[in-house]
Image (spheres, rainbow, N blue to C red):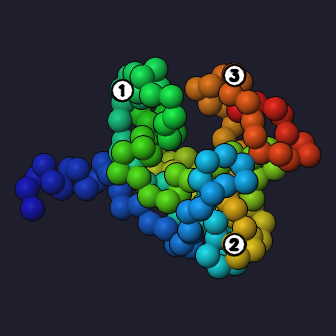
C-alpha cells in the first residue's frame, strides 16, 4: 500500500450499515429506507456513505444540483452522500423522526431514537439545511413545521 493510499484510508473511513434497510417508495418523499428487522432504541443503525469534500465544493454542488444528499461535518468539510452512496441516504426528513443523526469529524451516523418496527420507514429531523426554510416539508407529522 502506498503512502497516498494509506492517507486516503484515514480521510475516508469505512461506512458500515449495522441494521440493513430496504429501499422502496416512501410515504414521505421519493424513495425511503425501511428497516429489514426490528431495531432497538439507542442502537447505531449505520453510517451514511459518501465522499468528504470541502465546503467550497459543497456550496457549488448545492447551487448546481437540485436534489443532493449533503451533510456539513464542520466549517471546512462536508460529506457528499450523493457520491459513493449507501442506502442510509434514503432516510427522509420528518418533524417526528424515529432516528437521529450524529455528526463526527469524518462521518455521519444514524441511531434509533426509539424502538423501530420491522418494515417501518426510517426518518430523521435534518435540522438546519441549505434550503433555509424554503423547501416544503412532506412528512405529514402532527407536529410538522411545514418546511425543511
User: Do tag 3 and tag 2 residues touch (Cβ < 8 Å)?
Assistant: no
The answer for how far apart the CA atoms under marks 3 and 2 are is: 31 Å
Residue 28, how many percent across, how many down?
72, 49
Q: Between disc 1 and disc 2, whose residue precedes? A: 1
Q: Residue at x 58, y 26 (%)?
A: 130
Q: Between disc 3 and disc 2, whose residue precedes? A: 2
Q: Quadrant of the C terminus?
A: top right
- View extreme (bottom): residue: 37
Residue 144, how many percent across, how many down?
85, 39
Q: What residue is pinned by disc 1?
A: 57
The image shows residue 29, relative to residue 2, as above or below, that is: above
Q: Between disc 1 and disc 3, whose residue precedes? A: 1
Q: What residue is pinned by disc 3?
A: 134
Residue 128, how many percent across, how many down?
66, 31
- Tag nearer the camera, 1 or 3: 3
The image shows residue 129, relative to residue 134, as above or below, that is: below
Q: Quadrant of the N terminus?
A: bottom left
Q: Residue at x 35, y 35 (%)?
A: 53
Residue 41, picture quadrant: bottom right
Callout 2: helix, strand or loop?
loop
User: Do tag 1 and tag 2 residues touch (Cβ < 8 Å)?
Assistant: no
Circle 3 Cα neighbour tier, 10 Å, few/some/many (<14 / 14–19 / ≥20): few
Residue 119 circle label: 2
Residue 73 is left or right of residue 135, and the answer is: left
User: Do tag 1 and tag 3 residues touch (Cβ < 8 Å)?
Assistant: no
Residue 92 is left or right of residue 72, and the answer is: right
- View extreme (front): residue: 25
- Tag nearer the camera, 1 or 2: 2
Instruction: Depth check: give the residue in front, 7 or 68.
Output: 68
Q: Residue at x 44, y 36 (%)?
A: 78
Tag count in the figure? 3
Amino acid at each position: 500500500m502506498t503512502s497516498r493510499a494509506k492517507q486516503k484510508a484515514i480521510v475516508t473511513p469505512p461506512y458500515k450499515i449495522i441494521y440493513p434497510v430496504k429501499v422502496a417508495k416512501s410515504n414521505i418523499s421519493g424513495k425511503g429506507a425501511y428497516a429489514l428487522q426490528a431495531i432497538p432504541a439507542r442502537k447505531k443503525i449505520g453510517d451514511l456513505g459518501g465522499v468528504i469534500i470541502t465546503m467550497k465544493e459543497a456550496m457549488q454542488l448545492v447551487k448546481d444540483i437540485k436534489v443532493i444528499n449533503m451533510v456539513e461535518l464542520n466549517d471546512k468539510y462536508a460529506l457528499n452522500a450523493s457520491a459513493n452512496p449507501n442506502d442510509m441516504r434514503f432516510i427522509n426528513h420528518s418533524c417526528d423522526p424515529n432516528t437521529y443523526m450524529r455528526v463526527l469529524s469524518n462521518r455521519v451516523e444514524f441511531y434509533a431514537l426509539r424502538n423501530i418496527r420491522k418494515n417501518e420507514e426510517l426518518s430523521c429531523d435534518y435540522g438546519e439545511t441549505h434550503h433555509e426554510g424554503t423547501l416544503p416539508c412532506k412528512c405529514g407529522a402532527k407536529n410538522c413545521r411545514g418546511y425543511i
